[in-house]
Amino acid sequence: MPETIAFLEPKPSVLARRQQIVEDLADILPPGCLISEKRGLVPFETDAFIAYRQVPLAVALPETTAQVAAVLKYCSRYGIPVVPRGAGTSLSGGAIPQSDAVVIGLSKMSRILDVDFANRTATVQAGVTNINISEAVSADGFFYAPDPSSQLACTIGGNIGMNSGGAHCLKYGVTTNNLLGVKMVLFDGTVIELGGKALDAPGYDLLGLVCGSEGQLGIVTEATVRLLAKPEGSRPVLFGFMSSEEAGSCVAEVIGSGIIPVAIEFMDKPAIGICEAFAQAGYPMDVEALLIVEVEGSEAEMEAMLASIIAIARRHGVATIRESQSAAQAALIWKGRKSAFGATGRIADYICMDGTVPLGQLSYVLKKTSEIIDSYGLRVANVFHAGDGNMHPLILYNINDPEDAARAEAAGNDILKLCVDAGGCLTGEHGVGIEKRDLMLHQFEQVDLNQQMAARAAFDPQWIMNPSKVFPLEGRPAA
Amino acid sequence: MQTNFTPEQLTDPHVAESEGILRKCVHCGFCTATCPTYVTLGNELDSPRGRIYLIKDMLENGRPADEEVVTHIDRCLSCLACMTTCPSGVNYMHLVDHARIHIEQTYKRPLKDRLVRNVLAAVLPYPGRFRLALKAARLGQPLAAAMKRVPFLKSFGIMLDLAPAGIAPASSASTPGIRPAQTEKRGRVAILTGCAQPVLKPGINEATIRLLTRLGVEVVVPQGEGCCGALVHHMGREEQALAAARRNVDVWVKAADAGGLDAIIITASGCGTTIKDYGHMLRLDPAYAEKAARVSALAKDITEYLATLDLPRQEPKAIIVAYHSACSMQHGQKITMAPKILLKNAGFTVRDPAEGHLCCGSAGTYNILQPDISATLKARKVKNIEATKADIIATGNIGCITQIATGTDMPILHTVELLDWAYGGEKPAGILPSP
């Protein structure tokens, strides 16, 4: 395991009380809701950022908000670190525990509590998967818009923690734009509610602060989200280009001319090969770069928007244009795209970057990314949300080779710094987690971080909530 | 993901194979979402990703299996929904097979578990013993409720409960011999008579033989074949499973050499998944590797084979069928469309129940070994099926038929029984509504 990213030193006082803590948690939680034996703890040592691993002290799987509150109240009393976990799909290590931490997993809280079509809202427990919300309201013609590629598995609680995005967020916005309210447990067990079913709430927009706070301000146990009516129709269209630069400049002109399709997704040649092997979606295999552009609405609306996009694409040398011929093919096109990261596992280990750049810089950053990768002697596959400039270079390497792993990590850092230097930022939708924590000073001045940490400390003065994440270990206030 | 095996460990071909499987997993977590036990219990240790990690940790450390690991591996249904979902191509089936062998070799189960498993392994694969046991079970059924209240006897009480009311005499469909084509001959196949299915529902293979011979296919019932070995294979009893596989390979190779075979027809998809894996199971046996691979290539689910025969489209019938795709059919064998297309062409209206990817909880002997999870999954499955408001349920696996039938009043048939009727056979007895 690489050791470039350090975790906080475990608290000796907590480790020394391990047995007592486990016994106390067993009293607080119902049977079957606590994991404390070493064997059972190991599978919780990481999430989807598998380069780093830490076996936790215990895993609590509460079934109710009251149980979450009881565990937090207990942990805060003894200064025990807490790491919240949804489905453990974080690509930035947001759910990786530490050896003195109690993981609070929300996987048993997976009920949909209320669907209110009159107000277009759904209220769900935090462990409900993203796609379950859309599935629950689909028959009535509604859906929940943010659609992370891991939407099959990832939970709404995790989505709120990371302010997750997804392919269709170009038009509909990310989690924070679709979140109306939460029930949340604070570090000391206090249960609060923020927002509600309406668009705005009185006072500060604390909901906006909580969304994307990576489990450091509290643990969300219930969420009220906005539902949208499904469009009349939707159609993904494939645009193949002979260079990534042409595809990148095409995206910039589409967005720059004021056209907002539902999604514009980018894949380079290695990514096309990987996704086609898994999904057999009929992606063109003879192009260097592919854009999946989805339009939606009535037939006339789709036709009109497509015509404008095709005209722009022709100016950028588009080589192939393929419209999906059926609902089944459209589903395969998205299945391939959304499985891209996992499907990469067929050919190599990877770390998935998540930087965002201004659209005008897309072509430049793609070109520089290849140069960086080449200079480390590595390979890369690019598959990302081009419409909002949210890049995901997948750096391919061999995790069993420590030197290769170190090179991959260094290349990743260079790429993220490149995104910042190009006027963009470190994260698009995966959060900072542990992965990008030490790069925060490349993005922010210390004074910026101090303000953020002050806000954090207002919610969690003890710094027990997911403490190794987001803020560099140096320069933190004394807890 | 990262693995830590010594070169010495990797000289064991089973370990080497598992290492290759583990290296493909990127820990993305997609598999958790479609795992019936994770969806039911909400604990990652009861998900594919959790089990993969438990297995990895156990194998890497060369450790005997222990109670914690066994508990969570035992809860796995082997439904293989995770393999349909996995974008990385992780072969969970072969990994969990290896783990089960390791458990069987290194872990001593409590007495009750050993008793139950020994009884199942000694009875179910043998039609004669199974028929006898079912008759005895009918006599013992009044005791079932009381037995289920005693933890030690719970599994036996459940076994008694599962025994059906009427036990048919041994079916002529299982008698070895050749059933000639009734019309112009266009194919020649062998049929797996199987073990539990001909005892519980002899009508399935009878309908299969009627339909195939009527369509011009000669059907061979070879002498000497028996249980495919899936049942003991899933218990990790590898020698028993391989012995069953070798016996069947010998029988089918002989039949193929004697008169040629276009396919080995299997009417229970659970068996089909295992027989299609014979090539892999016997890959390390030089005397059998090639023959086993040949058998696996010939193995076809009945619907898979019928789909190659271009059956004529039939007049629509006023019957709505809820098609329940067995896990071994959709995940194990990746046969998803063929049965539904056959039913539609035969004139039935076909509906897909919601959450079709989730197991009904039958899973071989799972309903006996893990009764609580099994019952939860059955209730969920039945609710989804009944919501289709269909007239009848069709499926392709005897385990599902037995399981679902105990949870609903809707009639349930094997797909081939409906197809036999649609293509000139008798109407299946007493369970179809009048159209």
Image (cartoon, coloured by chain):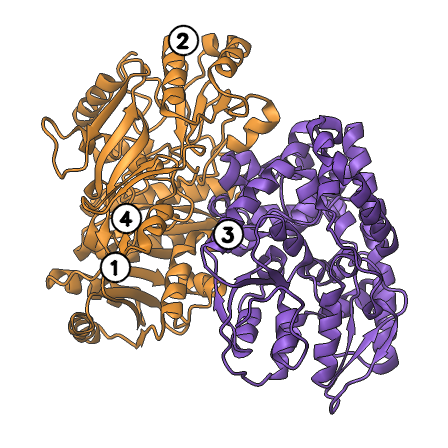
Chain colours: A orange, B purple
Q: Earlier in the sequence, mark 3 or mark 1?
A: 1
Give the distance between the C-alpha atoms of the residues marked 4 and 2, in whole angstroms: 38 Å
Find disc 3 in the rendering and name its residue: A345
Residue type, mark 4 in image: Pro
Give the distance between the C-alpha atoms of the residues marked 3 and 1, in whole angstroms: 25 Å
Give the distance between the C-alpha atoms of the residues marked 3 and 4, in whole angstroms: 25 Å
Give the distance between the C-alpha atoms of the residues marked 4 and 1, in whole angstroms: 11 Å
Question: For the residues tagged 3 and 4, is the chain the same?
Answer: yes
Q: Secondary structure at mark 2?
A: loop
Question: For the residues tagged 2 and 1, is the chain the same?
Answer: yes
Residue type, mark 3 in image: Gly
Residue type, mark 1 in image: Ala
Q: Earlier in the sequence, mark 3 or mark 2?
A: 2
Instruction: Give the mark toward the camera: 3 or 4.
Output: 4
> At which x and y percent is residue A415?
32, 46
For mark 3, name the chain. A
Horizontal arrangement in the rendering, residue B152 relative to residue A115 (left or right): right
In this orientation, does residue A409 appear? yes
Find disc 2 in the rendering and name its residue: A78
Q: Which mark is residue A435?
A: none
Find disc 4 in the rendering and name its residue: A146
Question: For the residues tagged 3 and 2, is the chain the same?
Answer: yes
